[in-house]
Amino acid sequence: MEPLPTSALVLLSGGMDSTTLAYTIRHDNPEMDLHALAFDYGQRHGPRELPCAAQTAGRLRARFDVVNIRALTSFLSGSALTDPENVAVPEGHYSDETMRATVVPNRNAIMLNIAVGVAVARGLDRIATAVHAGDHPIYPDCRPEFIGRLNDLIEVATEGFSKPGLRVLAPFVMQPKDFIAKLGDRLGVPWRETWSCYMGGETHCGRCGTCVERAEAFALAGVDDPTVYLDPDFWRTAAAAG
Amino acid sequence: MEPLPTSALVLLSGGMDSTTLAYTIRHDNPEMDLHALAFDYGQRHGPRELPCAAQTAGRLRARFDVVNIRALTSFLSGSALTDPENVAVPEGHYSDETMRATVVPNRNAIMLNIAVGVAVARGLDRIATAVHAGDHPIYPDCRPEFIGRLNDLIEVATEGFSKPGLRVLAPFVMQPKDFIAKLGDRLGVPWRETWSCYMGGETHCGRCGTCVERAEAFALAGVDDPTVYLDPDFWRTAAAAG
């Protein structure tokens, strides 16, 4: 039988999904050697979400590192997340066609493969990512097939160098976002220490895709949403139309 | 029938393998929209090989870019290629156990997935890499299974965003390095405009794994080797022992 994992690297953006994932892992594995990895890819909400990620890592006694991949951004341009001068962040529901402007091509494959390299270098047992079902309509690299094929790749790419059984776990991949809100609520995730808004202002805008998705998830889960939104009611209209 | 590719992105390090690959693609596709991508990952031979790559791209009318991923290096440390202060470049034959010190964990998966992102952003048809059979004994991410599984991943990771049929071609993956020397010779590759030595000095050292492999490949191919090596005869002993 494969030995139980004693170490894990969690991809921690500072949003509600990856924060809940990190809390879940720590809750289930109080003694685990936990590492958290965030990416600075020049996302306009970086100055908001990265400090949230650092705070969560501190609370959970996880080693925390930010990998700066900004140099890649100009090569993967055309996404509203990284190209503020030329591409506007679309408003509305996450599943809308317009939200395709937020796709950074192959982003998750790049980040997860970097995480694999880090996990091999540190001799870690598992990698965890918080991709979830709500991401599937627009991001092809958040789907179950993607995680499956990534694990097939890891198996051969790191053979002889990685800990046996190193693989990516994506426990939320078939779950909607309100499942995550419920789970996080149960684990006592301090939601004010998470950031979603793609606009990266002082306050959540309430109108971009990820704000709409956030507000909707709390509502569907029946969980009190402590987030301050500039436009607190927009999500109802967008969710109804989406 | 799938349309013929009209554009390609070649991973061009400036070594003899990728340079020969780029010459082959240009020879076979005189009108192709050719892009060349090099990586600065802090390799100690970067100042030698990257200018070679730029020169080749210029000769072949290819758009040339260097992607700076040095920020990753500290996270993937422990390789002799990127950690000059702490890890010595081993001498001897490439297939030796000691050469494992030159492995940067998951390097090709990271670079090729970045290349995929670039190809999607630019709407290109193909990606080409010069991994070859001589790399297999030590680098797991240079084997045919790796290329196959990477293509399985690309298929789902970029679905709906990439050009249909986008995939990685690795035409040398089953070929030994002397095949590349013969092919490059036939195509008139200017070998003096390629760089192999991991030491990154003014002249090829003749003793590191890639110098030994280079000299051996020319000899096996019966191709005149114009490279100046500091120790021009070491490779014979190392190759016999390897």
Image: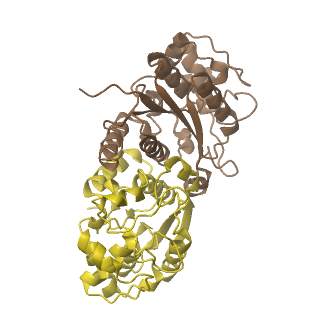
Chain colours: A brown, B yellow
Q: Which residue occupies the foreground of this view, A42 or A206?
A: A42
Where does residue B12 sit, x and y in percent of width and height? Answer: 45, 69
Q: In the rendered image, which quarter contains the N terminus of chain A?
A: top left
Relative to A222, is B175 above or below? below
Where does residue A110 sit, x and y in percent of width and height? Answer: 47, 47
Q: Which residue is rendered at x = 45% and y = 28% of the image? A: A132
Where does residue A37 sit, x and y in percent of width and height? Answer: 54, 37
Q: Which residue is rendered at x = 34% and y = 25% of the image? A: A4
**Horizontal relation, residue B169 to residue A224: left or right:** left
Q: Is residue A238 visible?
A: no
Where does residue B197 sit, x and y in percent of width and height? Answer: 45, 73
Q: Which residue occupies the foreground of this view, A235 or A224?
A: A224
**Horizontal relation, residue B130 to residue A18: left or right:** left
Q: Quadrant of residue B89?
A: bottom left
Relative to B231, is A139 above or below? above
Count how many numbered circles sit on residues in the image: 0
Relative to A36, is B63 above or below? below
Q: Is residue B226 visible?
A: yes
Q: Which residue occupies the foreground of this view, A47 or A145?
A: A47
